[in-house]
Amino acid sequence: MKFVDEALITVQAGKGGNGCMSFRREKYIPKGGPDGGDGGDGGSIFVEADSGLNTLIDYRFTRHYKAQNGEGGQGRQCTGSKGEDLVLKVPVGTTIVDVDTDEVLADLTAVGQVEKIAQGGWHGLGNTRFKSSVNRAPRQTTKGSEGELRNVRLELRVLADVGLLGLPNAGKSTLIRSISAAKPKVANYPFTTLVPNLGVVRTEAHRSFVVADIPGIIEGAAEGAGLGIRFLKHLARNRVLLHLVDMAPWDEVTPAEAAVTAVNELNKFSPTLADQPRWLLLNKIDMVPEEELEERCQSVIDALEWDGPVFRISAINKQGTDLLVHQLQDYLDEKKEALAENPELVDAERELRMQIDREARENLERMRAEMRARREAGEADDWDDFDDDDYDVEVEYVK
């Protein structure tokens, strides 16, 4: 199945039914009085997180969704039927944003979570509602109100505990194959993926975590170059980032330069995301001559002014990966325990994720505006050639 992580749709809640104007007309009951019933409420539109979905592809082909209108009232004080609600099922991790106001309408982070995104119209009142001692034959009714109409953007952010960050060919797919059951394709030539990959890492029978691999980013990604900037938003929910650096690059870019490039683009995309916990992974050490290894590793550490955790690994040979995954598991378990014991930390983390989401949306909107300006000026841009219907996979080196 093709992976689609963003879609624009229009939702229209149902209109409320009109109130009825009617008078009782029965034999032997003169002056029966008003008996017009109310209309029914219009159907609302909800979104529900479904564990069976992992892409927004369906919403690329059907763009308009409308809930059922409420029926009008009838005589004999019969109320019109309520319009049927419409429930749109989306993958867990989907955020719904109102395009016109930039308001976040819903953030679905748990299976089965249901949120309303468009309110159905209210019912109109029949003339029975207006009768009184001084108005015994009212001819007033009200019409049902229109349901809410919204243009919304569905944004899918994959839910993972750990996110992989790095330039193309840094070894992200090889690492996820090495430590999990995920099997993204790899090969002996460099190019990057168009879709994120997820893998479950099991350290013990009842201990595991999820790792997400996104397309590699390149220099200038924050200005629209390449594809990585489109997927950095998937790192917004990760508790820790693993920054992979290729210690045996195939081109003339040094490991230190590659590491700095990735960090710079991350800072441009979201300074808050760049400040999140990040571990440094120096990959492909098996391909570096032993006498050069320490010098290369130290050059990366110095260039980043790094003072956090550092792991020297070879993903393809699983060298150093056991220590990495067990320390990650311990770190994530400690984090979960701290959140469970302190509700204030939960609120703080939720606000932090919302801040990252805001920065990501602002950055992407700025890029879209720049792209539109370039197209209007007759200039080409890197997104014009991108086709969401293309298939591709991430490939890495194989020794």
Image (cartoon, rainbow, N blue to C red):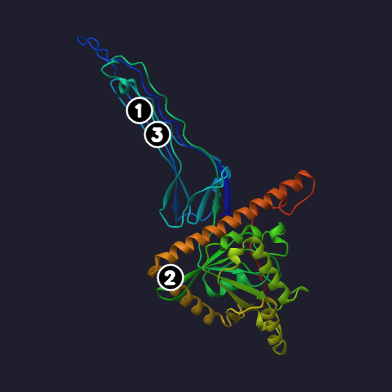
Q: Amino acid at mark 3?
A: Gly
Instruction: Give the label on residue 83, or none.
Output: 3
Tell me residue 8's x, y (percent): 58, 45
For the residue pair 255 and 194, the one nearer the viewer reads as 255
Q: Residue at x 44, y 74 (%)?
A: 333
Q: Amino acid at mark 2?
A: Lys
User: In the rendered view of the protein, which quadrant contains the C terminus?
Assistant: bottom right
Q: Earlier in the sequence, mark 1 or mark 2?
A: 1
Q: Earlier in the sequence, mark 2 or mark 3?
A: 3
Where disc 1 sits, the SS reads: loop
For the residue pair 386 and 346, the one nearer the viewer reads as 346
Instruction: Give the label on residue 80, or none.
Output: 1
Q: Disc 2 or disc 3, which is closer to the eye?
A: 2
Picture quarter containing residue 255? bottom right
Measure the alpha-carbon separation of dots 3 and 1: 9 Å
Q: Residues within 10 Å of mark 2 (few under 14, many from 20)?
A: few
Q: Residues within 10 Å of mark 1 (few under 14, many from 20)?
A: many
Q: Residue at x 43, y 31 (%)?
A: 69
Q: Amino acid at mark 1?
A: Gly
Measure the alpha-carbon separation of dots 1 and 2: 50 Å
